[in-house]
Image (tube, helix red, strand yellow):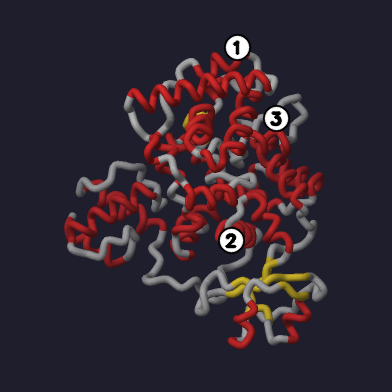
Amino acid sequence: MFGSSLRTVLAALVAVWIAAPLVSSSAHADAKFERWKADFARYAVGKGISKAIVQKAFADLKSIDPGVIRSVRYQPEFRNPLWFYFDSRVNERTTKNGLVMKEKWSRWLTAIEKRYGVDRHIILAIWSMETGYGSALSRPSAQRSVIRSLATLAFADAKRRKLWRAQLISALQILQDGILSKDKLVGSWSGAMGHTQFIPTSYYRYKQDADGDGKVDIWTNIPDALATAANHLKVAGWQKGKTWGYEVRVPKSVEKLKRKTKTLKEWEKLGVVRANGNAFPRPDDRATLRLLGGKNGPQFLMLRNFFVIKRYNNADLYALAVGHQADLLRGGGDFIVPIPRPFRRLTLDENVEVQKRLARLGFYKGPVSGIIGPKTRSAIANAQQKFGMRRDGFASKKLLDRLRAES
C-alpha cells in the first residue's frame, strides 16, 4: 500500500537493510537519535523550513518506529506467489466495490478521464490496490505519523539517506504550507499518504486540485486524489485509448524470448496469438513478452501502459493486478489460462468463515473481512502448527475443514 515511484528503491532497500541494530531502547541508541534530530533540524532550516515548524514536528519524537523497520522487510509484490497476491487484491469484493465507486464517482471520473486521458478503470484499480477505495485509511497501519516514519528511515538507512531526507523535508513543507496539521499528517510506514498513496515529494510533483477549491487534499477529497493519480500516469507517458497488454498463447520455442520487445505483428509471425482468438487491434504497437504465471500459467504481451503503471509502483505483479482489475471493472472476465495454484481458491464467504473459526479457537483477533492479510496468515500458520499441518499460512479448503472439525 504505497505507490508513486517508490517501489524500486524499496526493493533494493530490502537487500541492503542495515537498521536492525538500531532498533533499541538503549540510552546509546536514544542519544544517537537525538544527535541525528539536531543535525537534521539544522539541515531542514537550511532548506527553508522554519525553526518553529521543525521544533513542533520533532517535539514528541523521542525514538524511531520499530514497526517501520519490520514493515520494510515485508514486500508482498516480491515475496508472495502470484496466486496469493491476486487472491487478496483482485477478487469478487474488490470488483463489486469498484463498480459501486465507478457509479458513485462517475461525474468526476468522466472529467478526470477527459482532462488527463487516463482510463477511469485504471484509476479505480489503483485506488483499489492502494487503499481498497479508501477503506484501508482507517487501519492503524495507515495512521502512522509520517514525520516519525520518515525520520526513522532517514536515520536508519544510510544507503538511502538522500531519498528519505528529501521525503522528510517535503513532509515538513506540508506542515509549513498549512496543508495539514501535524496530527493529521499520517500515512503508511513508508510515508505514503492519502487515498492513492503519494510520498511527500510526489505529492508536490503531481498534486491536482480537481474541484477548484484552492487546495489539494488527497486524504479526504476523493476527486483530488484520483486526479493526482491520473496526472502521475499522464506525466509518466500514459497512452490514451490503449490497453496495458494482452493475454496470449506462446509457442514453447518462443518462451525463451521472455522480456524481449517486438512489434505485435513480429510476435504474430513467431506464432504468438491472443488467448481469446481475437486479432491485435494495432499490430505496429511494441510489446514485451512476460511469463508472469510461469510456464503453465497465463502469458502476456505487455504494452507501454503496463510500464507506465510500473512507474506508479515498480513491480510486475502490481501492474498486472491493476491492469486485470481494470479489465474486470470494464466488464471483462478472468484470465483464459488460470493462474496456477496449489489448491482451490476459497470464496470470500469461506475466507470470512476461516477468520471467524480462527477467532473462535483463539488464534486470531483481527477484523473479520475475508481479506487474508499478514495477521490472518500468522494465525493460520499457528493453527496449522497446532494441528500438525504444513505451516505455510495459506487459507485452503483443507484448513477450513480442519477448523470446522475443531470448532
Whichever of callouts 1 and 3 sits on the residue coming sooner in the sequence is: 1
Query: Front-most of 85 and 74?
Result: 74
The residue that appears at 72% across and 45% down in the rendered structure is 232
Whichever of callouts 2 and 1 sits on the residue coming sooner in the sequence is: 1
Mark 2 vs mark 1: give the one in front.
1
Q: Position of residue 336 (x, y in %)?
A: 57, 75
Q: Amino acid at mark 3?
A: Val
The residue that appears at 80% across and 76% down in the rendered structure is 283
Q: Which of the labelled discs sits on residue 316, or is there none? A: 2
Q: Secondary structure at mark 3?
A: loop
- Vertical arrangement, residue 319 with respect to residue 169, above or below: below
Mark 3 vs mark 2: give the one in front.
2
Q: How many tags in the picture?
A: 3
Q: Secondary structure at mark 2?
A: helix
Q: Position of residue 41 (x, y in %)?
A: 57, 20
Q: Which of the labelled discs sits on residue 52, or is there none? A: 1
Q: CA distance from mark 2 to mark 1?
A: 43 Å
Q: Residues within 10 Å of mark 3 (few under 14, many from 20)?
A: many
Q: Residues within 10 Å of mark 1 (few under 14, many from 20)?
A: few
The residue that appears at 60% across and 11% down in the rendered structure is 52
Q: CA distance from mark 3 to mark 2?
A: 30 Å
Which residue is at the far top? 52
Q: Which of the labelled discs sits on residue 216, or is there none? A: 3
Whichever of callouts 3 and 2 sits on the residue coming sooner in the sequence is: 3
